[in-house]
Amino acid sequence: MLAFGAMAHAQSSVSLYGLADAFVGEVHPAGATGNAWQVGSGGMTTSYWGMSGSESLGGGLKAVFTLESFYRINSGQAGSFPGQSFFGRNAFAGLSGHFGEVTLGRNTAPLFVSTLLFNPFGNSFVFSPIVVHSYLDSAMGAASLQSDTAIDDSVQYRTPEIGGLSGALLYSNAGVAGHAGQANYSANLLYFAGPFSATAAVQTLHTASLFLNGATAQTAWLIGGAYRFGAIKLYAQYERVENNSHVTDDSAQVGASARIGPGSLLASWAGTRRRPAVGSTLRWSSVALGYDYPLSKRTDLYAAWRYDAITSVSSGNSIGAGIRMKF
């Protein structure tokens, strides 16, 4: 019995892990009124915790699962925003092997993965200009992308990496039975080999609710690239989001990271041009600067500033300093 228990334990594993990110500063995006000095959560990376596990089934085949939850460390509340699902980051089960991986549940959208990998501020919802433009509402009326970073009721296939090239394809029926037209798709290709890396991604979204002047569907395309030479890494992205209400957003991002001393200097600019069905074209420009200082392999300190300006609307500064710890 003891031998059998030891064998079963060797064939399966479960891990508990996460990240805690807290900062103090002022968040004042364009279009907001008044000051908002705060102790905040997720300045550089949204705080989360998770559990994942796998069981070997033989022949290189594994059963896998992941459950990951965002939380706000400043208040102890679950979710990165009020009302978010408890396991809002990921919640899936599936199979992995030489063929790649297939998972069912709530999966991170491949388009979001491409966005965060090809800008120097990663997935920061406070300081990354391209993430803010793509996923957060502003004085322009709405975010460019109307999906969350993960998509419910989805099936995702991720390819194995071959020669630095990998990809992912996600399909979701949007949880609407009998409505084939409500299907959502997200897919990307990633290439990492030597100093050069690149990505291409596409996503289509259908919803019963109205957004962006009455739109019920949108399609987004993204291309990105990065190149490292010595202590400097350069980034670039272009994204187009088209809605069936004839509202179109074109966004571009350029950035760089440079090792200075023990840490890294981060810089990024993003601009979005929105062409509405009626009215004047709106332009939103954001620039961010930051410095990330590692205390260890798992803990770092950071300070960052972001400036936003929207044509004929307003401008605003956001600034903060914080600590981030992986566990």
Image (cartoon, helix red, strand yellow):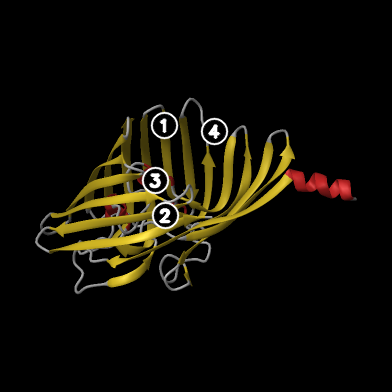
Please tell me which of labels 4 and 3 falls first in the chain: 3
- Mark 2 vs mark 1: give the one in front: 1
How far apart, in angstroms, are the residues tagged by discs 4 and 2? 22 Å
Asked which quadrant contains residue 283, the reply is: bottom left
Q: Secondary structure at mark 2?
A: loop
Residue 191: give its label: 1
Q: Residue 289: x and y, percent?
A: 24, 51
How far apart, in angstroms, are the residues tagged by discs 2 and 3? 8 Å
In the picture of the structure, the residue carrying the numbered disc 3 is 111
217 or 319, which is in the foreground? Answer: 319
Q: Is residue 166 left or right of residue 310?
A: right
327 or 98, which is in the foreground? Answer: 327
Residue 149: give its label: 2
How far apart, in angstroms, are the residues tagged by discs 2 and 1? 21 Å
Q: Residue furthest front?
A: 261
In the picture of the structure, the residue carrying the numbered disc 4 is 160
Q: Residue at x 86, y 47 (%)?
A: 4
Q: As displayed, is residue 250 above or below residue 301?
A: above
At label 3, which amino acid type do we have?
Answer: Leu
At label 2, which amino acid type do we have?
Answer: Thr
Please tell me which of labels 4 and 2 falls first in the chain: 2
Please tell me which of labels 1 and 4 falls first in the chain: 4
